[in-house]
Image (tube, helix red, strand yellow):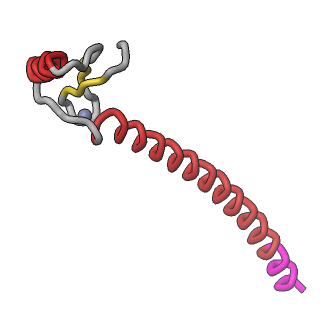
Amino acid sequence: MPSRKRSATRKQRKEFEAGFTSLDGLFARAEAGQDELDSRREAAHRARSCERKMRYDTRADAEDAIVRCEEHGTRGLRCYHCDFCGGWHLTSHGW
Ligand SMILES: [Zn+2]
């Protein structure tokens, strides 16, 4: 019966496509997980180096703040330009 054969072929094809779909889904999920990890790492990095810090509009403002801190006994501060907000922040790291 030709119709039976066609339906068997269609079933096979469907299973074949389903295999591809689930494989794609697997890769998509793996990539989404990696993206989520990256974005979480980036968010943590942003919180550490930007959002939790005082922001200065210009380098001069940041350097002013460093001078004020040194007057109050906090030494070893540096300022750096922030890629996240475009402002300046202070850090006590030696860079
Ligand atoms: Zn920032």
Residue 5 lies left or right of residue 42; in this view the side is right
The total of numbered circles placed on residues is 0
- Relative image position of residue 91 (x, y in whole percent): 30, 23
Q: Residue furthest right?
A: 1
Between residue 14 and residue 68, name the one nearer to us: 68
Q: Is residue 89 above or below residue 39?
A: above
- Relative image position of residue 5 (x, y in whole percent): 87, 79
Between residue 4 and residue 90, name the one nearer to us: 90
- Relative image position of residue 40 (x, y in whole percent): 47, 46
Where on the picture, by quarter, is residue 20?
A: bottom right
Q: Residue at x 86, y 84 (%)?
A: 4
- Relative image position of residue 75 (x, y in whole percent): 26, 15
Q: Is residue 80 above or below residue 26?
A: above
Q: Quadrant of the C terminus?
A: top left
Between residue 35 and residue 84, name the one nearer to us: 84
Where on the picture, by quarter, is residue 44?
A: top left
Q: Residue at x 65, y 51 (%)?
A: 27
Residue 94 lies left or right of residue 36; in this view the side is left
Q: Residue at x 18, y 16 (%)?
A: 70
Main SS, magenta region, reads: helix
Asked whether 19 falls inside the magenta stretch, the response is no
Asked whether 2 falls inside the magenta stretch, the response is yes
Where on the picture, by quarter, is residue 23?
A: bottom right
Between residue 89 and residue 13, name the one nearer to us: 89
Q: Quadrant of the N terminus?
A: bottom right
Give, as a single range, the part of the protein colored magenta.
Answer: 1-9
Q: Residue furthest front?
A: 73
Ligand 1 quadrant in view: top left
